Amino acid sequence: MMNEEDAVATLDQWDELHRVGWQRGTKDECEELDQLDDLYRNGWQRNKTKAKNYSDISSQSMQRRKRLASRLLLAIVILAAAYFASEYLFSVDLEEVQNHPSTLQIRIAKKENITRHLSTALPDGGCKVTPQKFAEKDISPTYQASFPGSGARMTWNLVIALTGIAINDDHNHAGVGYDRVVAVKTHYPLDYGRYVEDDQKFRGAILLLRNPMTAVPSFFNFKYEQKNHLPNHSTRAPTEDWIKFRDSNLESELNEYQYFVTFWMEKYDSRDKLLIVMYEDLIDYDEGPIAATKIADFLGQTDGVEPIGREYIPCVWHAIVKYKEVVVSKSGIESENKERKLVPSSPDSLREGPTERPYNSQQLELLKNLVEGLIEQFHNDEEFVAIMSTYLETISSTVALD
């Protein structure tokens, strides 16, 4: 049985291996990684007992020996690749994060392998970065549901930082299950997500909403990166590519948005089981720490989850969300902090390229119709109506570029 330390390492290494494999090649390469992972888990565990008695296998079982040896060799190769990746590709050493009069100061250490981090309280009011862990006992996880392009990875890291407990995704890529994770990232019921068979174990959901006018082009940037084998969150697509995609796919994308929002609003119609968070609030200087506090309070209602103290949440929020601030060192030297969520190997949201994502008048009308329809559909939910009304105001004030 895998111990907690190994399981956490597996979660980190698999997430990074899968991400880099996907960036490097095609979907087929990722499927090959999945197959290798399955061979390792199934083949290694199934033959572990036989391996211990290898020297006692009779000469009449030579064929069985060959099969076992092949599986062992495959496991060694996979483990070696995982070690190499964590040691040389995805390691980052963060010694300390603390408050500075203008921003957070990050000091990089040299010899400590950490691939994901959470922030914990220090007596002086700063934040210290430590590894994520699995819950000490089985807990009821929470869905972290979002339409693609709505800050899922940022929220993933924020949840870890607020609780100190690991997260999984709805594909269970790390093979660790859902019993001891605080949340499960999902885009379900869209094709990019997957139904979780242990659904009855979940206590509720955090629904992360973003204005469809910006969520759709953000997701398109991701698709553009995958199509052109670019690192995730590194490049914004050229405006002409956006226009071509927009003209062919906007209506279907908006239908997907409505389908996604409707599913989660109807699945949990009680506010003790559903927390709605605006992406726009989450990245705002004034509203961001408040939104992070709501997330911490909501997750803290789960037995076995003890979030960081409220007084430290602004520090945690700043470290995770506002990572591109100017960092002032003790020597007074200023530099741009481009370490995504305190993890330099994860270049999320460091996209470069054109920010303009124009819509024509007909497409703005489609966006307005979508939002107005959702307002009418859930008119009894004051919080949801207030969020959608904000989106409607932004869409209505946007100038069409026909």
Image (tube, rainbow, N blue to C red):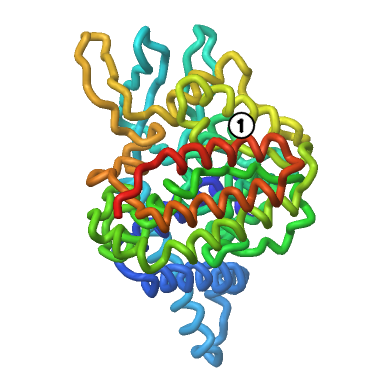
**In the rendered image of this protein, does residue 196 appear above or below residue 319?**
below
> Camera-side residue: 357 or 41?
357
**In the rendered image of this protein, does residue 49 appear above or below residue 169?**
below
Instruction: Give percent across and percent down for residue 314.
Output: 52, 19
Visible residue check, residue 175: no
Quadrant in the picture for residue 61: bottom right
> Camera-side residue: 94 or 101?
101
Number of marks: 1
Q: Residue furthest bottom?
A: 60
Residue appearing at x 49%, y 49% in the figure: 212
Disc 1 secondary structure class: helix
Residue appearing at x 35%, y 52% in the figure: 359
Residue appearing at x 36%, y 36% in the figure: 340
Instruction: Give percent across and percent down for residue 338.
Output: 29, 32
Visible residue check, residue 26: yes
**In the rendered image of this protein, does residue 330 appear above or below residue 28?**
above
Quadrant in the picture for residue 97: top left
State left or right for residue 72 relative to residue 184. Answer: left
Question: Which residue was labeled with disc 1?
Answer: 163
Instruction: Give percent across and percent down for residue 280.
Output: 49, 34
Quadrant of the drawing holding the N terminus: bottom right
Residue appearing at x 61%, y 60% in the figure: 259
> Camera-side residue: 26 or 172?
26
Quadrant of the drawing holding the C terminus: bottom left
Q: Amino acid at mark 1?
A: Thr
How crowded pointer 1 is (Cα within 10 Å; few <14, some 14-19, many 20+) is rated as many
Instruction: Give percent across and percent down for residue 245.
Output: 34, 64
